[in-house]
Amino acid sequence: MGNTAEAANSLSLFCVTCRLLFAMLAGMLVGIERSSRGRGAGVKTHTLVCVGAALVMLIGQYMNVALGNQGDMARLGAQVISGMGFLGVGTIIVTGRNHVRGLTTAAGLWVCACEGLAIGIGFWKGAAVTLIIIMFTLRVLVRVDLQMHRNANSFDLYIEFNGDNSVRQFMQDISCQNVRIKSLDVTRSRIDENGQAAIIGFEMRRGKDRPNLLEWIRERKYILYLEEL
């Protein structure tokens, strides 16, 4: 009886409001970070996901109390975690240059749902610590990830050429450099209708040598455009 009374007391209007407002704040913080980077799922999406997940756990707790501890509080939360996969997939896209975007946003939506579940059930400490970790990951570790990407030994380049034979010429010239070609996907150029474009996978012994290689490629007269993927 004591546990039931304590659980019922935690579902007071004040406590429910605090949980939902905390969920809204958590979703807003993650959404603001995503919006600042121009991602499709921004403040509104993350806020709604987090608040909705918190409400689901409140509903589960309410049902458990109303049924005298006979309900399963975890059942609704489990459906939220599995169902978030459908929403997350909608944020992942593959661009025309075979560049995958939206993975971090999809993961952010999923973790926002989990954050909402923790807040909804009243697990304040876990929710607060997780929110700090989420923001640290999105604001600080993203820079580490970017630095590692820049110094990676393997990388892909999108290159536009100004002639039909330029790709062959490039492959001959690049053989003199300290780099290995992993993959080559040739298509029509979007800049020069008579030219070609290619997505080329490179592998170097030292990732720090990449800037020199990029500068060398840009100096080729037949190169119209170069982009790191």
Image (spheres, helix red, strand yellow):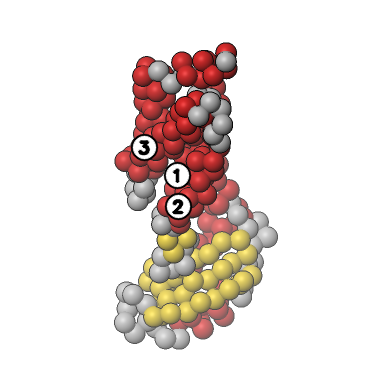
Q: Secondary structure at mark 3?
A: helix
In this rendering, does residue 196 appear at all?
yes
Mark 1 and mark 3: span between their CA atoms? 9 Å
User: Are the two marked residues, 1 and 2, in contact with CB atoms closer than 8 angstroms?
Assistant: yes
Query: Does 150 sit above or below residue 124?
Result: below
Q: Say whether disc 2 or disc 3 marks the residue closer to the N-terminus.
A: 3
Question: Which residue is located at x 37 percent, y 17 percent?
Answer: 14
- Residue 180 picture quarter: bottom right
Image spot of residue 208 (x, y percent): 60, 53
Side of 181 where 193 appears, left or right: left
Mark 1 and mark 2: span between their CA atoms? 7 Å
The residue identified by callout 2 is 88
Task: Give the residue type at disc 2.
Answer: Gly
Question: In terms of depth relative to the viewer, which is nearer, 109 or 179?
Answer: 109
Q: Secondary structure at mark 2?
A: helix
Task: Give the residue type at disc 1.
Answer: Leu
Query: Does 213 sit above or below residue 167?
Result: above
Q: Say whether disc 1 or disc 2 marks the residue closer to the N-terminus.
A: 2
Task: Give the residue type at disc 3.
Answer: Thr
Question: Which residue is located at x 52 percent, y 15 percent?
Answer: 6
The residue identified by callout 3 is 47
**Dot 3, how many residues are within 10 Å of its Cα: few (below 14), some (14-19), or many (20+)?**
many
Image spot of residue 97 (x, y percent): 43, 68
Q: Say whether disc 1 or disc 3 marks the residue closer to the N-terminus.
A: 3
| Label placed on residue 150 | none
Mark 2 and mark 3: span between their CA atoms? 14 Å
